Image (tube, rainbow, N blue to C red):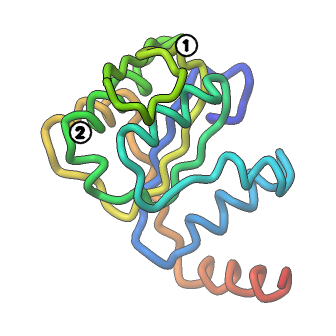
Amino acid sequence: MVLNEKAETHTLFILGRSGVGKTYQITKILKEKFGIEKLSKMKMGGHKTPLDYYCAIYDNSDGIFYWNDLNKSFFLTSTGISLLKQSTDTQKDRKVDYGSTTGKMGNRLPYCIFKGKQIFDMNTMPRSEEFQSIISRSPPIKFNPTNKEIIIMGYEIVKDN
């Protein structure tokens, strides 16, 4: 949905319990489409502050981002939620504002026009009211493979490595 050039979808939330192969499947698809070098530049995760997030989308405003297991605190801060609301808006060109006086902004302007696409790989959804407005724009896809499908993915992983 997100990778199709003609599709209007630019944000995708994939939700599923830990250890069922979400990361493996998403990475496999992205690697096939873009190659391992480009994948390493688009895959981000772990601890990201709202400033990290803003700088990433500012520096590659028409890129594709794969946000894998972002820290939960990002989704609970008012700044993080504000940035997500702006970057997941339903418009093709989304204005994202981040007003800050920190020197960590470098030469970046306090806003950018974000035309990129995003995939969020998450184990659980934040239960805040604010976050509900974000996922209403792109309802999450639940990744819930059967035990047989998990075994098949495990076999693929072993075979590939």
Q: Residue at x 17, y 50 (%)?
A: 127
Q: Residue at x 45, y 62 (%)?
A: 46
Count of marks, rendered view: 2
* Residue 161 drawn at (x, y percent): 83, 85
Disc 1 secondary structure class: loop
Residue 30 tag number:
none
Residue 131 tag number:
2
What residue type is disc 1 on? Lys
Out of 23 and 42, give the one closest to the viewer. 42
Left or right: 159, with 62 as reference point = right
What residue type is disc 2 on? Phe
Question: Is the residue 68 above or below the residue 108 in the image?
Answer: below
Q: Which residue is mark 1?
A: 92
* Residue 18 drawn at (x, y percent): 43, 75
Check if mark 2's residue and mark 1's residue have beta carbons within 8 Å: no
Q: CA separation, marks 2 and 1?
A: 20 Å
